[in-house]
């Protein structure tokens, strides 16, 4: 066993609550595990379900006090907002259509927010929430998990430092197979709400995974989108939203992007893969093999950077937990998003300034940009694949 | 060593000539080696260079008779056309702008043609040549090498037989790095003519490798293009043609395609990679690892088919030469294209009908389609990435 | 996001203590995180260091009560043993030479044990501890992490069910690079104690990673070793123990094994890789890419099983936490070892019988076998690579 | 298409004959194709079969003169030996037991030899032939194909130049699946003679592929074997020879080797893989992916060298034929062995001295060493896996 990077555990413990994530839910469990993993925040309250019995059962199983289990998110926001020991933040793990009202309720009661992606349904909603958060000096984190991976953080720094020259082209794909057949009509609950416009919004494939793609490209490159040309497909008959999309992106400054997102790509589980081509080199990263970066340069053999083995930027190294060859995965990336957020929140609450390295989490601007990305792609596609300004 | 598939060698020997491919050229040597490899045709005449001394030297080195070395392709076409033992076909390995006049000259003198890709500069030229070839019952082969790979042939049959259901989406990319810097201004002769509109035509990246991409997708799927939306980029300052392209394709019948071709993708040598997604499965093939197919199905583990090991369709198996695990590569694929062409030509000359299995080579229609693909992509890009009918 | 397998959280909470793992240690932190991850046991007491100030600081940071922080493991074993709410088990994360006395102290005070591997120094010690544990009906878990991976569990069941026929040959390798240079003389503390016979025992490479290799092979195949022939090398001059070993294994019943373990294999991080060849098929698993199994059969294309995507045995599926394509890694495997152990311990304490599926953790027999493996390999090597009975 | 390395074609044409390789044989066809590929030697005579009708038919198909087709190798050796235009060398592609008498016959008639591996049955035979060849100044090439790969040649030069420091350990494996079942009793002719001691010699797995392994390791590292410890297994019931072997090798100077060869490794086609660990770096090469080298160094990211892309030693570069990303495979490697041999033979016949770079083919010493390797491994195994001097 080689000497690991020093594990860092924040001393300042925060408390939090959760809306959604009751018995039978998946993602709420993920959030709770990763909170426990680093011990950065303690879950103390919740409105886990519209069914209060479910909330009570979940709360009991988790060892929460009965008095901090609430019948609805509205009550929870109001009641927690009144407490002197109110939660530092709430975690929102409901279907998409509830993100807006719940976020608003908690922000208005002075409570910061961690919200699943995509953030809300419209740019207008996003702007409204941004205004409230800014006025109240509250933080909002939209859990784009993948920028929590240490090698994503490493790639970001390499690119920012000009190691591959000027970025010319970004090829990004996020392809899955789980909607290859009409599972939403065969009892798959996840599929049912994710393909239902009322619960999921304007788009399925762009909304669910296109936003992840937009986020990670933006995170890695810092490029700003100027215009998009999108073609959304619905391959499964009777499906109410798209399940596949091809997107051309023009970035400000001349770089170009090409994205493919799919929920019908048979044989692909959660295949997010990014290739960034610069004038002097290129970087490739794949979420399913997240501990490595393929880095190529002109006139030199291509290299494979291994997390934990090879020299990394300190801002990336700090998020690497175990030695090289001991695989880190999805949970650790997720925990890293929380670590960044909790560290920033603790500093913010202490009145400290938050620098870029500390604020290394997907914030409300990232969330809002994702919402606009959905809107613009859907608009372009409806216009027959026309180019639309971003 | 396991028992190999039986090597097949055509008995009927053909003769051929070559235009281009003199001392210092590369691709002419490849053509000559693969002709010798299978012994299907004997090179007997040539006009290898505009410099007759070069032609004479090349001819001498290759052991050709002095009387069948010609000062120009015009003379060669006329003189060979007159001979009772005239060559069965000519191989054209010149820069692109000469493909049209040379092909025309030989066809008009009753000689079949093997021509490098892309075929000619305009659809009008292609149509004219097609008319001549049909009238004279001559064959034209445009050497799209990659459909010569046994696993490409296997994938084609699997798809045609419905093994992956209806094709929904095709992701194709052909990315290289060799034009990442302005090498055409630094003495690279290949780069100089390939980025010169006069010698190479309307496009560099689409013309050189976009056509390969179009061809292999068409070969594998049998899909016909309905419309395209293309964005051609020139990333290297001062370059006169594009060096990167993003192309959305709508196929007749509802399938979709997304292509990326690049000559500035640092770290990529000759990275042609095709993923074909169907309603029941998907197939992935990569030219740089050509002896394998990744085949996925719904509800079953993904599989890796190995050439020479796993059961293949007879039409594909026939092109596999050595047992599994003994890699076959570029030369063998190239030789397979010739094998198909020579077999078809011998049959054609013998007055036999050529069925689809025998005619398994890229013919004049494939060449013409490539020309149209270049035209349409350039047109779309000039219109700002508008959709244009194919 | 596809529907995940149901996360299972034990209801019965256990309590535990820890010996070792104070400030600056690595593996103690890993143990604590994975305990928190599943919430299976709560850490309530500790003797984290020989330096009591360190113990106090660590305990304070972890929020433990001052009264359950102890000056030494001896005191801790005695005092905890007297309490009505004594810890259910102790976690031992010290250098190897302390495993024996600490395990003995806690067992004698009626407390079950989780101990790092390798277990103890001699088979005699192992036998003594086994006797005590059996008499007291206490459980001992030796943390061979890698059998916690779901795909290792899947492979085990496939083999047990005859899916690859009779096992003929096992190729196993565990290769690392971290001792390629004399880092033990350059300030690397891990290296210092791991190459010190007094602290680490008879062997470095066989002791540290050879035992992991022996364990995972035994876990996967159920084969019992009959004899070994080992060659231990010390490639770094001045090193006091071996840093590389080649081991031939004869199993009872005729199967054969060949193991390579190395701490000087430049370019390899933590590269544990197992290939099991049977009469009808073969299975390959690699710790650095743990979410997949390569499974081959005669006369069928090779397959890649993906955790979370493909059908698994229920006993393996139960340890898979997130959907396919969301990588699980080292921490999750480690947590799975604890999950198995805590579930078994809870049942054992409740007087229930523990069946094989529940007892799916590396127990004291596994630990003892590892000790014998070290002894026999060292003996064989000292005899010049002679075969010795196991 | 990037600028390729200059193809080199020898001017001096040689002539050759062949013994074995009649209708229905496989490897004779491979030899003939690769001879044609580079045009280095012309096949002019043959005794292709014990059945003279087969010889006549094969000769006719290949266009050979009737007068140079012989009823037996004995007649051929004598008759060719008398001619003023006698063949420069003979190619022997018969089962192993005939290698010795045929080689002897041709050497004694003043004709150089290319012989399939393994060379002969006994070291005594090898010594006798070596003596004759030396006296007559004739060359013998034993076709160990794999050192013909450019990346093997590159690895050899890197190691010789100290790029990975002192070689410490070599892990080599050559595993196949084709004898997993008793195919020799089910009509597989290759299997029948390869598992028949009379035709194949002392060993099947060590003889057929163990010798390849020994050769490539020796070629790459230049290490000399001091002693071996081998365990030969016969896993398929009723088989008369071994089908799997584990071999420990001690090299002079302290380096160590560990080899696994198998003909029952289900899922593996022709999987020859070599890893060479040095004090400063390591190199990995796999025959099934032959265009790349994985090269690792201490304290630097691992690299992937790509044939045709990355800078190579001139002696290796000279054998690379097509640009990077255009795969070269088995045939090209085989042709390279002939290229080296024919170049050396032409120089030898011209009375020139042959330097190491030119003599880069597996010669009679390599062949003899392979024979001794079989003998020693079989001896060790018969002694129960004892160590025996080499």
Image (tube, coloured by chain):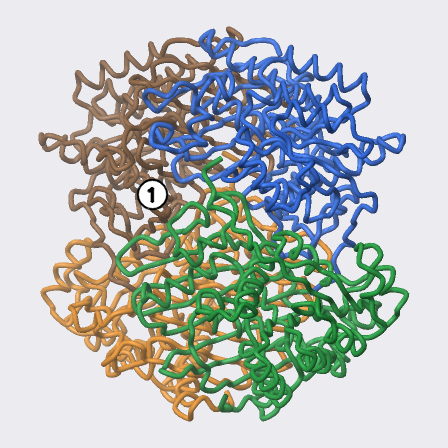
Chain colours: A orange, B green, C brown, D blue
Residue D47 at what x, y percent from top left? 62, 32
User: Relative to A352, does residue D326 appear above or below in the rendering?
Assistant: above
User: Relative to C331, does residue D345 appear above or below in the rendering?
Assistant: above
Q: Chain of mark 1?
A: C
Q: How many marks?
A: 1
Residue B343 at what x, y percent from top left? 54, 62
Can residue D216 be seen in this snapshot?
A: no
In the visual, does C94 lie left or right of D314?
left
Can residue A345 be seen in this snapshot?
A: yes
In this view, the residue in front, B60 or C6, is: B60
Local packing at callout 1 (Cα closer than 10 Å; few below 14, some 14-19, many 20+) is few
Residue, disc 1: C299
User: Relative to B226, does residue D160 appear above or below in the rendering?
Assistant: above
Residue C311 at what x, y percent from top left? 24, 50
In this view, the residue in front, A362 or D156, is: D156
In this view, the residue in front, B331 or C183, is: B331
In the visual, does A236 lie left or right of C28?
left
In the visual, does C143 lie left or right of C80?
right
Q: Residue at x 64, y 81 (%)?
A: A253
Residue A198 at what x, y percent from top left? 24, 83
Indicate the secondary structure of the residue bearing disc 1.
Answer: loop
Figure quadrant of residue B142 = bottom right
């Amino acid at each position: 066993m080689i000497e690991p990077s020093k594990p860092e555990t924040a001393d300042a413990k925060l408390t939090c609550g959760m809306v959604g994530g009751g018995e039978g839910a998946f993602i709420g469990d993920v959030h709770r595990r990763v909170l426990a993993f680093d011990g950065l925040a303690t879950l103390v309250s919740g409105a886990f379900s519209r069914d209060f019995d479910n909330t009570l059962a979940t709360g009991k199983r988790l060892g929460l006090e009965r008095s901090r289990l609430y019948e609805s998110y509205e009550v929870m926001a109001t009641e927690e907002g009144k407490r002197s020991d109110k939660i530092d933040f709430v975690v929102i793990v409901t279907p998409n259509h509830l993100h807006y009202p719940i976020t608003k309720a908690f922000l208005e009661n002075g409570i910061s927010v961690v919200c699943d992606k995509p953030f809300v349904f419209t740019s207008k909603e996003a702007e409204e929430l941004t205004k409230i958060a800014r006025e109240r000096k509250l933080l909002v984190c939209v859990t784009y998990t993948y920028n929590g991976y240490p090698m994503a953080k490493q790639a970001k720094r390499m690119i920012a430092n000009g190691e591959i020259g000027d970025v010319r082209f970004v090829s990004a794909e996020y392809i899955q197979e789980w909607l290859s057949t009409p599972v939403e009509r065969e009892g798959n609950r996840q599929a049912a709400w994710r393909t239902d416009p009322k619960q999921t919004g304007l788009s399925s494939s762009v909304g669910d995974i296109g936003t992840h793609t937009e986020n990670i490209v933006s995170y890695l490159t810092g490029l700003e989108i100027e215009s998009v040309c999108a073609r959304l497909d619905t391959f499964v008959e009777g499906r109410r939203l798209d399940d596949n999309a091809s997107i051309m992106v023009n970035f400000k400054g001349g770089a170009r992007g090409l994205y493919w997102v799919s929920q019908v790509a048979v044989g692909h589980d959660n295949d997010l893969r990014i290739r960034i081509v610069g004038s002097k080199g290129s970087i490739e990263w794949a979420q399913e093999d997240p501990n490595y970066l393929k880095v190529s340069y002109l006139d030199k053999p291509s290299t494979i950077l291994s997390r934990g083995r090879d020299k990394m930027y300190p801002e990336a190294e700090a998020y690497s937990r175990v030695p090289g060859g001991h695989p880190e995965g999805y949970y650790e990336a997720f925990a890293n998003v929380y670590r960044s957020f909790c560290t920033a929140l603790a500093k913010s609450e202490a009145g400290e300034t938050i620098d870029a390295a500390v604020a290394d989490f997907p914030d409300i601007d990232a969330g809002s940009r994702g919402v606009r990305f959905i809107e613009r792609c859907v608009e372009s596609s409806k216009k027959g694949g026309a180019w639309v300004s971003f």
